[in-house]
Image (spheres, rainbow, N blue to C red):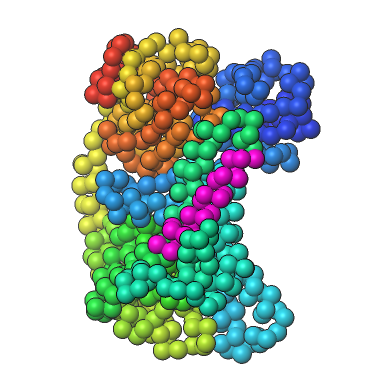
């Protein structure tokens, strides 16, 4: 299917970009706001290969294309300069959602992920400037340096604004609220007042002791420096999301445009400076201090453990939860001592892959290992980990040990990270002290060389153990269960199961996306009906696409046209790519809120059409709970 052509053809037949006011998409449909719907040729669009139907509803012209909607949507956006109504998905959680610490780390990491690219780019500019100034190749007083320095510092100084945007998306708040509150925290007048003379001291003699410089309606305001901070704006935006929902629910529609933002900003803004901000700063500092204290108990041992285990965390995707601590430490101390402990992981993986490439007699293995070594140089270690090291157990052990030795050297040598930048060996300038090259940076360079040498020599000595690799592969294959030909799906929600053909959305009732069943929910929780991988987690939380382990694919769609709520009343607990177990909580929704907003909350459970699908048979109607068998799916 040529999705680029399909997108362009759809755009042409709706009247061209001149007839489009805006466009967005949900889990299955491209949703246009057209200036004149009469210009759209319904019959031509319906008969296009790849289009399932056209629906006109709620002032929207909806083209139903199924699970590949994002590809079609992207083609439409690229073909025309059109406004969009869509936000990116940043909803995330950890793979284990049962622990408070895991939840907190998962939340912070999901907010960080959308900004990491820009964070690394800005940090790399700072690192290059540090390198150029350290060798005397650029004066710190020259115009070029000053301009590039401002460019690199802008994101870090206004970090609360950027995180306010990302956090707002995560908490279901309009992004402009988060950005405005972030800008408020670093507003120049308040920043200047924070460094002024104190009126008095609050909580004297406690861990919460702080000076206050202003009062708000007679209440003391302990101003803090929020530039580059992380936790305060996240906490403020979370609070603002509830304030917004409260006022949006209780203020009459005719007054909402002005008074919802008016009331939200006053309440959230005042609370951010009086309560949330100061407490968040204290908690952030305590957290950072606790981590640094633990590391400093024995930095050598910490270096070996963190250095050797980091690649394991990368393999399981758990490293995302730790990355925010780098920025928290840089914000608090001006540097981070965790990141240098993992720097040697890249040269160790590089050495292992290169050693196998040089020693093996197999041409395919040599080619694959050299390619993996190149990827490792640029900070992408997964090809070497999965393709070279894991199939060769001794190579994996020696490579991890080499990274641990490097971590020990970096830790004992006092290496520090001063900014963000490129991954892998290209990121070494980020460890240069702004004051010039010091012993810590030299120790970091030594750690990388030693890790590379140990891993390389070990791989050359051990060689390419093809027999061992084949044995491991055979054992792995023996553990993989055969795919089932018939799958039974339990109900993802509690409620009343009804015939899918009776729902009020014709796309579902006409089975255009596939057969299934509907459930009128009795509560607001959706659970995984089987072990699966989350194929799609829409940012508004109203729909989830699952790929079952047997090859079946499910679409769980909460409500009719609830995408128009823009995430209000929905809280997603999953993100795309996550593995979920049967019974895991996927989405929570406010059942009463959806009904009061005028939407039908019926949950559609659809087995989407694939080449593997044979038949779908509903198993029951009437009262169901999350243990009730709902559908029988037969696969070819």
Residue 256 on the magenta span: no
Observer-nearest of 592 and 449? 592
Q: In this view, does 146 lie above or below 487?
A: below
In the image shown, does 596 or 357 lie closer to the viewer?
596
**Looking at the image, which is closer to me, 205 or 390?**
205
Q: Is residue 160 visible?
A: no
Query: Which residue is located at x 43 percent, y 58 percent?
Result: 275
Residue 417: x and y in percent read 44, 75
Residue found 41% across the figure and 30% down from its top: 590
User: In the image, which residues are magenta?
Assistant: 258-279
Q: In the figure, is residue 429 to the left or right of 358?
A: right
Residue positioned most to the front: 218
Which quadrant of the rendered structure holds the N terminus? Answer: top right
- Is residue 98 visible in the rendered image? The answer is yes
Q: Where is residue 389 in the image (x, y as percent from the top left)?
A: 31, 61
Q: Is residue 69 above or below residue 473?
A: above
Q: Is residue 259 within the magenta segment?
A: yes
**Residue found at x 32% / y 36%:** 585
């Amino acid at each position: 299917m040529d999705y680029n052509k399909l997108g362009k053809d759809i755009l042409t037949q709706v009247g061209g970009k001149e007839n489009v006011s805006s466009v967005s998409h949900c889990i299955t449909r491209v949703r246009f706001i057209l200036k004149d719907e009469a210009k759209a040729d319904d019959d031509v669009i319906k008969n296009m290969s790849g289009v399932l139907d056209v629906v006109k509803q709620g002032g929207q012209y909806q083209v139903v294309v199924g699970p590949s909607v994002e590809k079609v949507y992207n083609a439409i956006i690229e073909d025309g300069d059109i406004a969009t109504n869509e936000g990116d998905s940043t909803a995330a959680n950890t793979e284990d959602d049962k622990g408070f610490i895991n939840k907190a780390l998962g939340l912070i990491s999901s907010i960080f992920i959308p900004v990491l690219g820009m964070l690394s780019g800005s940090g790399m500019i700072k690192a290059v400037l540090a390198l150029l100034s350290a060798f005397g190749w650029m004066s710190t007083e020259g115009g070029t340096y000053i301009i590039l320095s401002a460019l690199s510092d802008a994101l870090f100084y206004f970090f609360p604004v950027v995180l306010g945007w990302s956090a707002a998306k995560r908490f279901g708040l309009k992004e402009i609220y988060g950005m405005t509150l972030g800008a408020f925290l670093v507003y120049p007048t308040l920043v200047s007042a924070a460094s002024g003379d104190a009126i008095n001291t609050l909580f004297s003699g406690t861990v919460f002791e702080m000076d206050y410089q202003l009062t708000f309606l007679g209440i003391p305001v302990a101003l803090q420096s929020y530039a580059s901070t992380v936790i305060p704006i996240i906490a403020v935006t979370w609070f603002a999301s509830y304030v917004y929902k409260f006022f949006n629910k209780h203020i009459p529609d005719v007054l909402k445009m002005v008074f919802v933002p008016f009331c939200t900003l006053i309440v959230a803004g005042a609370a951010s400076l009086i309560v949330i901000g100061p407490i968040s700063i204290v908690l952030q500092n305590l957290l950072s201090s606790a981590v640094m204290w633990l590391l400093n108990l024995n930095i050598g041992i910490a270096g070996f453990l963190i250095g050797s285990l980091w690649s394991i965390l990368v393999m399981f995707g758990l490293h995302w939860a730790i990355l925010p601590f780098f920025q928290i430490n840089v914000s608090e101390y001006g540097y981070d001592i965790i990141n240098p402990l993992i720097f040697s992981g890249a040269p160790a993986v590089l050495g292992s892959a290169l050693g196998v490439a040089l020693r093996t007699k197999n041409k395919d293995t040599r080619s694959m290992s050299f390619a993996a070594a190149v990827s490792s140089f640029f900070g992408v270690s997964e090809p070497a980990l999965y393709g070279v090291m894991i199939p060769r157990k001794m190579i994996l052990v020696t490579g991890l040990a080499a990274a641990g030795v490097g971590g020990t050297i970096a830790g004992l040598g006092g290496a520090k990270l001063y900014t963000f930048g490129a991954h892998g060996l290209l990121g070494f300038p980020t460890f240069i002290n702004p004051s010039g090259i010091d012993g810590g940076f030299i120790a970091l360079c030594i750690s990388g060389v030693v890790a590379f040498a140990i891993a390389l020599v070990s791989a050359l000595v051990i060689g390419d153990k093809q027999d061992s690799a084949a044995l491991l592969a055979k054992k792995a294959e023996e553990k993989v269960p055969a795919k089932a030909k018939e799958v039974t799906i339990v109900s993802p929600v509690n409620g009343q199961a009804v015939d899918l053909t009776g729902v009020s959305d014709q796309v579902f009732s006409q089975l255009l996306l596939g057969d299934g069943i509907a459930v009128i929910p009795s509560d607001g929780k959706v659970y995984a009906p089987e072990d699966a991988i989350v194929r799609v987690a829409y940012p508004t939380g109203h729909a989830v696409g699952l790929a079952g382990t047997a090859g079946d694919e499910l679409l769980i769609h909460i409500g009719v046209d609830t995408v128009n709520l823009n995430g209000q009343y929905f809280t997603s607990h999953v993100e795309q790519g996550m593995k979920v177990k049967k019974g895991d909580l996927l989405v929570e929704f406010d059942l009463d809120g959806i009904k009061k907003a005028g939407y039908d909350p019926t949950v559609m459970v659809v087995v989407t059409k694939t080449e593997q699908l044979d038949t779908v048979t509903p198993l029951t109607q009437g009262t169901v709970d999350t243990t009730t068998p709902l559908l029988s799916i037969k696969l070819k």
